[in-house]
Image (cartoon, rainbow, N blue to C red):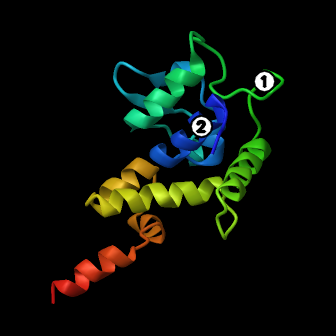
Amino acid sequence: MEMSERDRAILVTFLFGGLRCNELRMLDVEDVDFDEGSIFIRYAKRDKERIVPLHDLARQALTDYLGDRASGPLFLSNRRTRISNRRLRTLVKELGTRARLKKDLHPHTLRHTYATLLREAGVELGDVGNLLGHASLDTTRIYDHMSMTRKKLAVDKL
């Protein structure tokens, strides 16, 4: 599936960063620390801030997309202004349609996928919650989708 460097960077950053739609939208180039391998989330829910690790795939996608651009909004619209939440939602939905997914794809679905991938990799629920910026483990539990593989492994322990 062919996509622009910007769209690939958006998708990979959503998928491997666990960001909310507005968190991604409000990122500036300066919020990405390529040396430290992190993203500074300035506009998290409830006026909180957090730093999330930058996955290697996201780092490469962002590097390819940014080129030599060193400041300003990270993700630009076609009019060279900060991309809108509406466009991000539409873009992710279009990518899901192009991938022939049976259900509509939403940015928040990618956040759930991120949490699931972390859990599948053996990351503790509290650490997942920290990466997602949750204040409560009860909130994080909503994101804890157990795959059939994980279910089978659990049953096999009996």
Horizontal and vertical percent position of residue 85: 74, 43
Q: Mark 2 points at which residue?
A: 8
Q: Which residue is drawn at 74% across and 52% down?
A: 94
Whether residue 9 is situated above or below residue 45 in the rendered picture: above
In this image, 86 relative to 124: left or right? right
| Image-quadrant location for residue 124 | bottom left
Q: Position of residue 37 (x, y in %)?
A: 36, 27
In the image, 98 versus 29, the foreground residue is 98
Q: Which of 44 and 6 is in front in this view?
A: 6
The image shows residue 84 at horizontal and vertical percentages of 77, 38
Q: Where's the N terminus, which quadrant?
A: top right
Q: Where is residue 70 in the image (x, y as percent from the top left)?
A: 57, 11
Q: Is mark 2 on a helix, strand or loop?
A: helix
For the question of whether residue 122 can be seen, the reply is yes
Work out whether mark 2 precedes mark 1 in sequence or the reverse, and give the earlier one: 2
Q: In this view, does 102 lie above or below 85?
A: below
Quadrant for the C terminus, please: bottom left
| Marker disc for residue 81 | 1
Amino acid under label 1? Thr
